[in-house]
Each structure stands twice: as structure tokens, then as C-alpha cells.
Amino acid sequence: MRLLTVVLWLAVAGQAVAAELPPELWDRPRSAQAVMAQPAVRQAVAALQSRSDARLLIVHGTPTEAQLQAEELRAWLVALAVEGARLQLRADASAATIRLELID
């Protein structure tokens, strides 16, 4: 099994939290358990829940596949009881993977 690399930047409260999802997540069928097993997702959701005024930005590349992956991730998060109004998608041509950013 390949070692998954997750890049996490956690800053003090009030500053941005960003994490990248490993591309390997999209190589196999997903489930709620598989999505929440990702350290980047768990940490981003925990940070979002601890800050009532924050939103979670799902940054994705510009190819159609990247947009579909971001939309699927958003759907999984909503299904897992993350308030949809607190989730936003943003295309970024420089994004190689999906990145989660906690913003105020």
C-alpha cells in the first residue's frame, strides 16, 4: 500500500487552515468512512465546527474531472452533516489536487 502524503498547515485560531487531499483518494470507490478517514478532511471539518463564522473552501483544478471530484467531496460532506451553506467550491488553474481551506 502506498504511503499517503497529506500536507497540512495549521495556524493559530483566526488564521487560515489548509490541507491537500491525496490524489489516491479518487483511485477507488468512496464511502463516507473513506472520506472521513482522510486526515485532511477530519482536521478541516473539526476546525470548521469549532469556528461558527468560518467556511470551508474546496479548491480544485480546472479540468472537468477535478470539478466533479470537488462536487463529490462537497456532497459527501453535506451527507455527513456539514452545513452546505458553509461549503464553497473554487476553481484554480494552478491546483494539482483538491485543497481544503478554512476561511473566515
Image: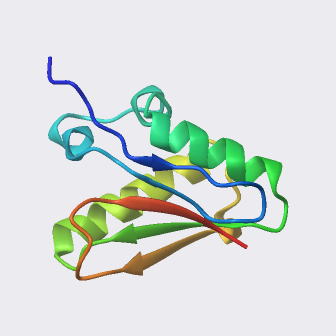
Residue 84 at x, y = what percent? 65, 64
Q: Quadrant of the C terminus?
A: bottom right
Q: Residue at x 29, y 71 (%)?
A: 67
Q: Is residue 80 above or below residue 66?
A: above
Extreme top residue here? 1
Q: Residue at x 85, y 60 (%)?
A: 52
Nearer the observer, 74 or 24: 24
Instruction: Confirm whether residue 59 shows in the render.
Output: yes
Closer to us: 1 or 84: 1
Give the x, y percent position of residue 58. 46, 66
Q: Residue furthest right?
A: 52
Q: Is residue 94 left or right of residue 11?
A: left
Quarter that holds the N terminus: top left
In the orientation shown, which residue stands out farthest toward the front? 12
Image quadrant where residue 64 sits: bottom left
Q: Is residue 28 left or right of residue 75?
A: left
Above or below, 94 against 42 in this view is below
Residue under the image location 43 percent in, 79 percent down: 90
Q: Position of residue 79 (x, y in %)?
A: 58, 46
Count of numbered circles in the view: 0
In the picture provided, is 91 more to the left or to the right than 55?
Answer: left
Instruction: Specify whether residue 81 is in view.
Output: no
Front-most of residues 80 and 20? 20
